[in-house]
Image (cartoon, rainbow, N blue to C red):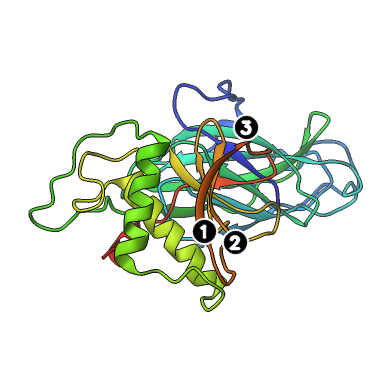
Amino acid sequence: MDRRMFRLGAGLALVVFTAACAQNPESPMSPSATETSTAANPDGSTLKVSAPVPVSPADGAVADSVRPTVTFRNATGRFTSVALSYRVQVFNAAGAVIGEFAVAQDGSGQTSLAAEADLAFDTEYRWRVRAEFSGEAGPWSSVWSFKTPQRVVLGTGDNVGPPRNISFNEAYDILFAIYQAGRWDLTGRSSRDTLNLYLETAVAALHYGHGKWNPRGPDAGWCIKNGGPGRPQSDDVIARCDTRDAWDLIGGIGGSNPVWSPSYIGRLPSVQQIYPPRASTLSRLP
């Protein structure tokens, strides 16, 4: 699944909102599609498709991170044979539009859009989406909300420095130290979920900071990645969130004799999603 990126704030790719874009999210447009006329429906839609259906985060749920991915089922209808695009609107809790983003339809039946920058901690956001084609727009989906997680508060006595840039060499040393101290089994005796959990937990110490393993301060530029559309998280690759530069850490992971042999593998292609680790994994650090 191709997960595109969105950014909130002054650097939006789309900053000019039409009257239709500024509607109050508490009164979303009707989901009915035009069937017999090119004139606008009462909800303002002119494209003969259904409204997309939000999938995740679940309505009212707490997102896994402050860089959430919104996912929706594609619109269906008379024009499903053409390459639709989608417009996603993001609102604050008061109902004001704070971001508007375009994303191409994914052929899997679901399309996703991921944040490329951290949102505020412990904050409610709302979003909706509609299909578009050649200047025509379908009906808006229902409005769903999610809340970002609370900022991780480390235990008493943990002093973590301010945000900073962590080099790959330092990042590698921290990841290896966590591996040794936690006695993680990265051989074939462990499940893929266990291998993934080690990497996510260790990268969380880089991304968020940790009083024991990364007390000098966090670097939110370190992320993990998936293996491509529809594939799970990688178990031994870390990447820079902004540049997509990536490093392979362990040769033969999941085999009989994994060996730590870090190597730079270049910049990852756009089909591979890069995302931050879950802050909740910090609780698993030794």
SS class, disc 3: helix
Mark seen at residue 252: 2
Residues 181 and 43: in front is 181
- Determine crowd level at label 1: few under 14, some 14-19, many 20+ residues with C-alpha closer than 10 A: some
Q: Quadrant of the C terminus?
A: bottom left
Tell me the amino acid under the disc marked 2. Gly
Are the residues tagged 2 and 3 within 8 Å (C-beta)?
no
Are the residues tagged 2 and 1 within 8 Å (C-beta)?
yes
Whole-Å distance between the Cαs marked 2 and 3?
Answer: 54 Å
- Determine crowd level at label 3: few under 14, some 14-19, many 20+ residues with C-alpha closer than 10 A: few
Residues 212 and 147: in front is 212
The residue lying at 37 percent from left, 61 percent from top is: 179
- Determine crowd level at label 2: few under 14, some 14-19, many 20+ residues with C-alpha closer than 10 A: some
Q: Is residue 23 above or below residue 17?
A: below
Are the residues tagged 3 and 1 within 8 Å (C-beta)?
no
Whole-Å distance between the Cαs marked 2 and 1?
Answer: 6 Å
The residue lying at 26 percent from left, 53 percent from top is: 152
Whole-Å distance between the Cαs marked 3 and 1?
Answer: 56 Å
Of labels 2 and 1, earlier in sequence is 2
Mark seen at residue 20: 3
Mark closer to the observer (3, 1): 1
Say which quarter of the image contains residue 103: top right
Q: Position of residue 94 (x, y in %)?
A: 38, 41
| Furthest-bottom residue in this view | 189
Q: Position of residue 241 (x, y in %)?
A: 50, 37
Q: Is residue 43 left or right of residue 153?
A: right
The residue lying at 86 percent from left, 53 percent from top is: 77
Mark closer to the observer (2, 3): 2
What residue does disc 1 label? 259
Of labels 3 and 1, earlier in sequence is 3
Tell me the amino acid under the disc marked 3. Ala
Of labels 2 and 3, earlier in sequence is 3
